[in-house]
Structures are given as C-alpha cells and as structure tokens.
Amino acid sequence: MSTDRVDAESKVSGNQANIPARIRRQLDIDDGDRLRWYVGDDGTVRVEVVHRRGGSFADFTGYDGDEETDATTDHDAWGVE
C-alpha cells in the first residue's frame, strides 16, 4: 500500500490534461503562465510554474500630474537642446 498523498487528479484527453482548480489557485496559475516539466531517471515528474510577466508597461499606472503633456512633442524634443 502506497503512503504517497494524492492532492488532485485529472484525466488526459488527447494530448492535454487539465490542472485541477484547487491546484491552479494554490499555485496561482493563470492564463499565459507556462509549465516546465522535468522527468527523473526513476520516472518521477516535477513541474515548475513559470508565471507570465506583464508587458513593458504592466506596472505603469499612467501620468497623474496636473500639467497637460504632449507625447509627440516631448518625444521629438527629447535629448535636443
């Protein structure tokens, strides 16, 4: 009798398997994240979650100042004295 704990189970359909919702929540897996699979010599499988990083402006909250800005003029004039 095995003493290994089973956290969740899913069924393979074609070449895909679902990640149970409880596991997705626990590991904070979201759309766009990647899974890296490692298979040991003894047949054990380890999966690493690689969370998707946002784009270049993911943490950008925008300009919150009082002055109006003109991005075209500011861009074209940048670095010009």
Image (spheres, rainbow, N blue to C red):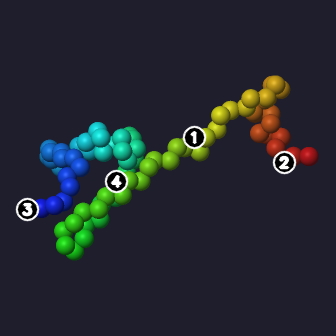
> Which numbered dot is residue 79?
2
Which residue lies under the disc numbered 4? 35
What residue is at 20 percent from the left and 52 percent from the top?
6
Give the vertical position of 80 relative to 72 (above or below).
below
What residue is at 33 percent from the left and 43 percent from the top?
24
Kindly indicate whether the residue at mark 4 contacts the one at mark 3 (C-beta within 8 angstroms): no
Q: Quadrant of residue 67?
A: top right
Kindly indicate whether the residue at mark 4 contacts the one at mark 2 (C-beta within 8 angstroms): no
Which amino acid lies under the numbered mark 2 shown in the image of this protein? Gly
Give the number of the mark in front: 2 or 4: 4
Residue 32 in view in this figure: no
Give the number of the mark in front: 3 or 2: 3
State the SS at label 2: loop
The earlier-in-sequence mark between 4 and 1 is 4
The earlier-in-sequence mark between 3 and 4 is 3
What residue is at 80 percent from the left and 36 percent from the top?
74
Q: Percent position (x, y) of residue 61?
A: 65, 34
Q: Given the current orientation, which residue lies at the most extreme bottom position?
A: 41
Which amino acid lies under the numbered mark 4 shown in the image of this protein? Leu
Which residue lies under the disc numbered 3? 1
Which residue lies under the disc numbered 1? 58
Q: Percent position (x, y) of residue 16?
A: 20, 47
Which amino acid lies under the numbered mark 3 shown in the image of this protein? Met
Measure the alpha-carbon separation of dots 4 and 1.
Answer: 22 Å
